[in-house]
Amino acid sequence: MLPLLFMVWVVIVIVLRIRQMDEYQVKLLFPGLAVGFTVSMFAAITLGTLSAAGFSVPNAGWPVALIGILSWEFTNLITGAPKA
């Protein structure tokens, strides 16, 4: 249950942070969210395909989350999005 509580906390913090931003800051932040989500989905599909093909990927959820977060932060760095 603790990881679920952490994820609820992360969602609440992100929503509160976005509500404090002005329109320009939000416009800079959303490309990072979109890229992070897209990269996470591609990573999940890739790991799922590898798993279906018989390749064992232990703890496959962690690489998906890490790749998504890193791509989100990298995109924010490139676009000049505000720091949280």
Image (spheres, helix red, strand yellow):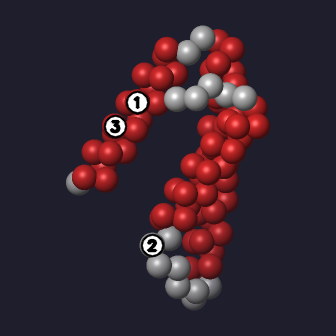
- Which structural element holds mark 1? helix
**Mark 2 highlights which residue?**
59
Relative vertical location of residue 14 with respect to residue 44 in this rendering, above or below: above
Q: Which mark is residue 9?
A: 3
Mark nearer the N terminus (1 vs 2): 1
Image label count: 3
Report x, y in % for residue 29: 64, 28
- The residue sitting at the bottom extreme is 54
Q: What's the residue at 58%, 72% (across, down)?
A: 48
Residue type, mark 1 in image: Val
Measure how far apart labels 3 and 1 are at the Cα level. 6 Å
Q: Are marks 1 and 2 in contact (CB under 8 Å)?
A: no
Labelled pair 3, 1 in contact (Cβ < 8 Å): yes
Provide the residue designation for mark 1: 13
46 shown above or below 81: below
Residue 51, relative to residue 81: is it above or below?
A: below
Callout 3 secondary element: helix
**In the visual, does 39 lie left or right of 6?**
right
